[in-house]
Amino acid sequence: MTVIVTGSAGFIGYHVSHALLAAGEKVVGIDIVNDYYDVSLKEARLARLEAAGDFSFYRLDVADREAMMGLADDYPDTDRLIHLAAQAGVRYSLENPYAYTRANVEGQLVMLELCRRFDGLKHFVYASSSSVYGGNTDLPFSVKDRVDKPISLYAATKRSGELLSYSYAHLYGIPSSGLRFFTVYGPWGRPDMAAFIFTKKILAGEPIQVFNRGDMQRDFTYIDDIVAGVLACADRPPVLADGDPPYRVYNLGNHRSEKLTDLIALIERELGQKAELELLPMQPGDVRETYADISESQRDFGFSPKTNLEEGIPKFIAWYKEYYGA
């Protein structure tokens, strides 16, 4: 059987694809490989996937309807579609909003239409985000919370993806699971994320921008835990129950909220250098704290994050030094 993974040149998509290949799966990777961040990093990820197993790659836009529908003809044995391609980042959505509606809304719709073409599809798993919780101050964030007040365009597009998936599960019986990721970090990570930015600037002797003057907390989640959650979820599709469609939404987080200043201190310790802090006000669309309630993902597919920040940051720093020769 075939597993299609979109966003396979991206951070999470690369790691999920690599884990599937290691398990002997046949993986078809889809990615547009845009220049939102360093393309050479994406190409390096792809090179490792091509050497890792039965991996076929297509440089395509997930919102390209004609190209995506062709996959149904080429890979009719697809039984899982893991849709991780997206335009990420809260702050960039203020600069280029149309990139978000195309990738995150149109792309989601095209993927759902693609799902309808596979007779043997068992599960559609897709990336959502903790950003959908908006300015919610009730902690930890629960999938039972209302999420109808997004405070960024990025959040609005990810919530739109959830709603589209619900409607297709209802109309066509497509088993769908949305995964709300909480601040994922680790080796081969995204250069626009805090751990990556801080590491790069500290090594260069440049000041790091610290928003809300450092009064921020995040549920930092290590990539290996996220991958374990994605794969466990993919193997356990939701079913029709009590008249409800086969649709679920889950939180994938570390189930602990940690201070941004603690993250900075750990990076300083691993680099052996102090950071120069540029304390700034809160940015538009940002939130002060995130914290995941993972009870549903624990119950339904045994999600159990194992890596805390003190263990994960040294692994990230070790990779960064090796990859960049720092």
Image: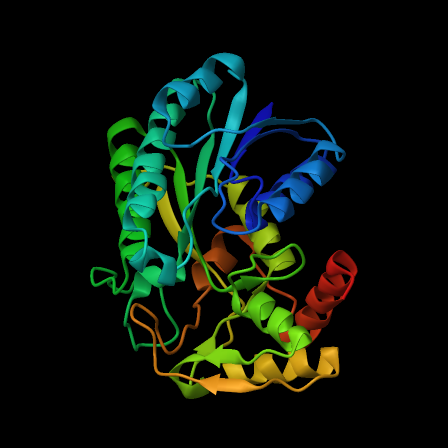
Left or right of residue 103, residue 7 in this image: right
In the image, residue 15 lies at what x, y percent?
63, 47
Q: Is residue 258 visible?
A: no
Residue at the (79%, 60%) spot, across then down: 322
Q: Relative to 189, say whether 313 is above or below.
A: below
Residue at the (27%, 72%) spot, across then down: 135
Between residue 28 and residue 190, name the one nearer to us: 190
Q: Relative to 322, say whether 5 is above or below.
A: above
How many numbered badges does the structure rendering display? 0
Residue at the (58%, 79%) spot, across then down: 263
Colouring used for the render: rainbow
Q: Relative to 236, say whether 301 is above or below.
A: below
The quarter of the rendered structure image containing the N terminus is: top right
Quadrant housing residue 146: bottom left
Q: Residue furthest left?
A: 148
Between residue 288 and residue 299, name the one nearer to us: 288
Q: Relative to 244, say whether 149 is above or below.
A: below
Between residue 108 and residue 304, name the one nearer to us: 108
In the image, residue 48 lies at what x, y percent?
73, 40
Residue at the (56%, 68%) spot, across then down: 197
Quadrant housing residue 279: bottom left
Q: Is residue 233 visible?
A: yes
Q: Residue furthest top?
A: 73
Quadrant housing residue 326: bottom right
Left or right of residue 299, residue 224 in this image: right
In the image, residue 110 lies at what x, y percent?
34, 29
In the image, residue 324 lies at what x, y percent?
73, 59
Between residue 226 and residue 217, name the one nearer to us: 217
